[in-house]
Image (cartoon, helix red, strand yellow):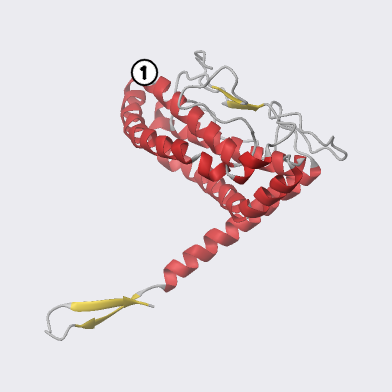
Amino acid sequence: MTEPDESGRFLPEMMIAVPERQRRWTVLLRALLLIPHFIVVWALGIAANVVVFLGWWAALFLGRLPEWISGYLMLYIDYSTRVSASAMLLIDTYPTFVLSGPGEALRTEFHPGRLNRAAVLFRIILFIPAAIISSVVMAGWTALAFFLWLIVLVLGRTPRPIFDASAAALRYNFRANSYFSMLTGAYPKKLFGDERAEPNPPQVSYGTRPLVLSSGGRVLLIVFIVLGVLGLASSGAVSATQQPACAPHSDGYAYECTYA
């Protein structure tokens, strides 16, 4: 799962064993089945925020993360990514809790190492573009989640365009989280895969190492981006228009505010 990398430039990898079939009953109940995992991920995430803060100070002075900090953050990101992969119908097997088991359909690879102190100091600012891209793509996936779920439920498998686009979205999110957590100095990249799209791809994906997007997967990923931009823009517009209208209370001292 991890080996030291003195360069600190290793781009974290996410490997998925593509399922030939998806059991329809698990697809139907996927959200309910994952509720215990969502609770655990939420609880571990609270601790992860504290650990990242401590890791930021440690990396600023040491130029790298202490082993216990990197170990916890790798465990958390690996686990949350496996849960997300199941929720996004990229895998069919039920994720093990917290620690990765021998039969996991998704594997992650990290090589934490030396970190540039200036990049650590300004990590939040540097992270903003990657955070925006990740948020946009995942928001677009969420907008189509019901239709993707319905397609997989009817077919009993994940069509390659859906697998490719969803895997690309999740891998970028995984790399963005790894960068923010200072598990790597390599900036998130390769949203559209590792190689050029194939004009006549096989029905089943090769997997994610390398991640080669089919033409359909590339188009669907672009749809994710467009829908994500529109969704986030509309949310911002709605928030901006909901300005409070305030009027003096009858007692003449307090004000009552209502939102349009």
> Vertical placement of 29 versus 15: above or below?
below
Residue 91 in the image, given as x and y percentages of width and height: 64, 33
213 or 79, nearer to the observer: 79
- Residue at image point 49% right, 34% down: 80
Answer with left or right where residue 116 lies relative to residue 157: left
Answer with left or right where residue 154 lies relative to residue 188: right
Tag 1, which secondary structure? helix
- The residue carrying mark 1 is 68
Residue 254 in the image, given as x and y percentages of width and height: 15, 77
25 or 250, nearer to the observer: 25
Q: How many marks?
A: 1
- Residue at image point 62% right, 26% down: 105
Residue 198 in the image, given as x and y percentages of width and height: 83, 37
Q: Residues within 10 Å of mark 1 (few under 14, many from 20)?
A: few
Residue 55 in the image, given as x and y percentages of width and height: 35, 27
Dividing the picture into quadrants, the one containing residue 50 is top left
Pick out the residue farthest to the front.
25
- Residue 50 in view of the camera: yes
Dividing the picture into quadrants, the one containing residue 57 is top left
As shown in the figure, which amino acid type bears the numbered disc 1?
A: Trp
Dividing the picture into quadrants, the one containing residue 159 is top right
Answer with left or right where residue 189 lies relative to residue 195: left
